[in-house]
Image (cartoon, grey):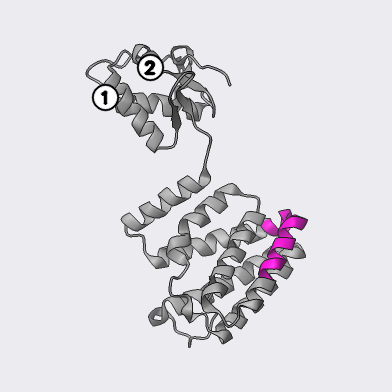
């Protein structure tokens, strides 16, 4: 792992001019250190595994107190930008990425800001519709084998609403992952708490059979490389779910699939 001297990193401004790290004086706050390090990460000057140095070195580097450096490092650690190692050879390093952490944080913010269930279903339709088009083009033999296993698993749970619903969740997530797009996977994972129903006892045998049939058709379209067909099927499948999630807003009589 390389050691990065922060004072020697030239950053690129929006106007194209380079500039060096600016000492942070007593009138500044720890957030300004956070901004400098975050900007260096996005500019490519810092990469996962790069060492920022010890607390003492950072105090000298930014010309601030230990308390200010500690506050900055705590913020950076909370943001997932750095990890702190104690002992000899320790200090602050740029952390490795973890998309699950981002998905969890986004899901929490959805909840705290009051994002509605209708909004999340809209987003699910957009994400899954795009993902199955990519999955039809990029799916691997391993992806198809796993999806097939999940279909067999779901069939064994037709009379078990809770396990059938959980199996349906795994099928949808596996389709997203088969797209090979980690951004779509992270976004979908962030929605899971809002769009995956907790009252899975509504996946009665008749609804479960309809859901399984829809999943088998989706699998076949992805397997056969029919992306546009898969997208149309997915959108229809999720609109059926919307009708059961929000019966008062649906014009049609209930009878859609409940699983995902």
Q: Is residue 195 left or right of residue 136?
A: left
Q: Nearer the viewer, mark 2 or mark 1?
A: 2
Q: Residue furthest front?
A: 87
What residue is drawn where x is 44% and y is 61%?
A: 193
**Secondary structure mostly taken by the magenta-highlighted segment of the chain:** helix
Q: Position of residue 96 (x, y in %)?
A: 53, 34
What residue is drawn where x is 36% and y is 28%?
A: 73
Front residue of 53/225: it is: 53
Q: Is residue 107 above or below residue 17?
A: below
Q: Which residue is mark 1?
A: 29
Q: Position of residue 227 (x, y in %)?
A: 69, 62
SS for dot 1: loop
Q: Is residue 125 above or below residue 258?
A: above
Q: Which residue is mark 2?
A: 58
What residue is drawn where x is 72% and y is 67%?
A: 148
Which range is magenta?
Answer: 135-151
């Amino acid at each position: 792992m390389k050691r990065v001297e922060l004072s020697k990193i030239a950053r690129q401004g929006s106007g194209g001019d380079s500039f060096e790290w600016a000492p942070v004086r007593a009138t500044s706050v720890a957030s300004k250190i956070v901004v400098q390090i975050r900007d260096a990460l996005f500019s490519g000057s810092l990469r996962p595994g790069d060492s920022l140095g010890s607390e003492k070195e950072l105090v000298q580097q930014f010309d601030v107190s230990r308390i200010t450096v500690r506050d900055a490092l705590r913020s950076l650690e909370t943001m997932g930008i750095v990890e702190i190692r104690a002992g000899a050879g320790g200090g602050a390093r740029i952390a490795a990425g973890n998309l699950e952490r981002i998905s969890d944080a986004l899901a929490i913010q959805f909840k705290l800001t009051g994002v509605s269930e209708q909004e999340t279903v809209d987003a699910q339709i957009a994400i899954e519709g795009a993902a199955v088009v990519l999955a039809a083009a990029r799916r691997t033999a391993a992806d198809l084998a796993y999806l097939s296993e999940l279909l067999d698993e779901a069939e064994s749970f037709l009379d078990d609403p809770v396990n059938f619903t959980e199996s349906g969740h795994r099928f949808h997530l596996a389709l997203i992952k088969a797209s090979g797009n980690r951004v779509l996977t992270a976004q979908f994972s962030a929605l899971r708490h809002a769009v995956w129903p907790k009252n899975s006892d509504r996946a009665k045998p008749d609804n479960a059979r309809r859901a399984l049939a829809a999943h088998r058709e989706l699998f076949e379209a992805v397997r056969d490389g029919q992306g546009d067909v898969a997208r149309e099927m997915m959108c229809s499948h999720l609109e059926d779910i919307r009708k059961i999630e929000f019966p008062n807003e649906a014009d049609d009589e209930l009878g859609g699939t409940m699983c995902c």
